[in-house]
Image: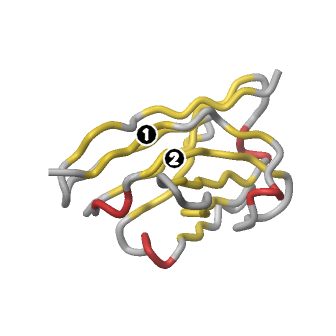
Amino acid sequence: HVQLVESGGGLVQPGGSLRLSCAASEFTLDYYAIGWFRQAPGKEREGVSCISSSVGSTYHADPVKGRFTISRDNAKNTVYLQMNSLKPEDTAVYYCAIREGGCSWYEDDYAYWGQGTQVTVSS
């Protein structure tokens, strides 16, 4: 069955970096758009970054532009989210999700989700 597994979360100090991974099983990621979303305590889930299928166009939400980079390694069937200059407000559970077609900021457009990985930015 379709499975997405996120990893790479953890505790980091403000200004630090983390790289999240989203690995897929039972299907090939490069045929899908991959989105990263996050949900902080008491807040709704929000879109962070997305990479399209085929040409791999990337999109980042305004709060993370210039700090986060999404990329994909088709040989490893994995999508990454490089997060630099982390801030306390980046603290959240981060999820990856897939959809057919182009990128979307709407979580209802995504068919499959991973279980999430916790990112905590604190001194």
- Cβ–Cβ under 8 Å for marks 2 and 1: yes
How far is mark 2 from mark 1, CA to CA?
6 Å
Q: Is residue 49 visible?
A: no
User: Which residue corresponds to mark 2?
Assistant: 94
Farthest residue, direction bottom: 62
Q: In x, y percent, where is residue 89? A: 35, 63
Report helix, strand or loop for mark 2.
strand
Q: In x, y percent, where is residue 39? A: 54, 53
* 95 displayed left or right of 53: left
Farthest residue, direction front: 42
The residue that appears at 59% across and 55% down in the rendered structure is 37
Report helix, strand or loop for mark 1.
strand
* 112 displayed left or right of 67: right
Residue 84, numbered label: none
- Screen quadrant of the N terminus: top right
Q: In x, y percent, where is residue 27? A: 78, 30
The residue that appears at 75% across and 65% down in the rendered structure is 106
Viewer-closest of 30 and 80: 80
User: Which residue corresponds to mark 1?
Assistant: 118
User: In the figure, 57 relative to 71: above or below?
Assistant: below
> What type is the residue that disc 2 sits on?
Tyr
> What type is the residue that disc 1 sits on?
Gln
User: In the figure, 72 relative to 52: above or below?
Assistant: above
Q: In x, y percent, where is residue 112? A: 78, 40
Viewer-closest of 44 and 46: 44
Viewer-closest of 114 and 72: 114
Q: Is residue 85 visible?
A: yes
Viewer-closest of 122 and 114: 122
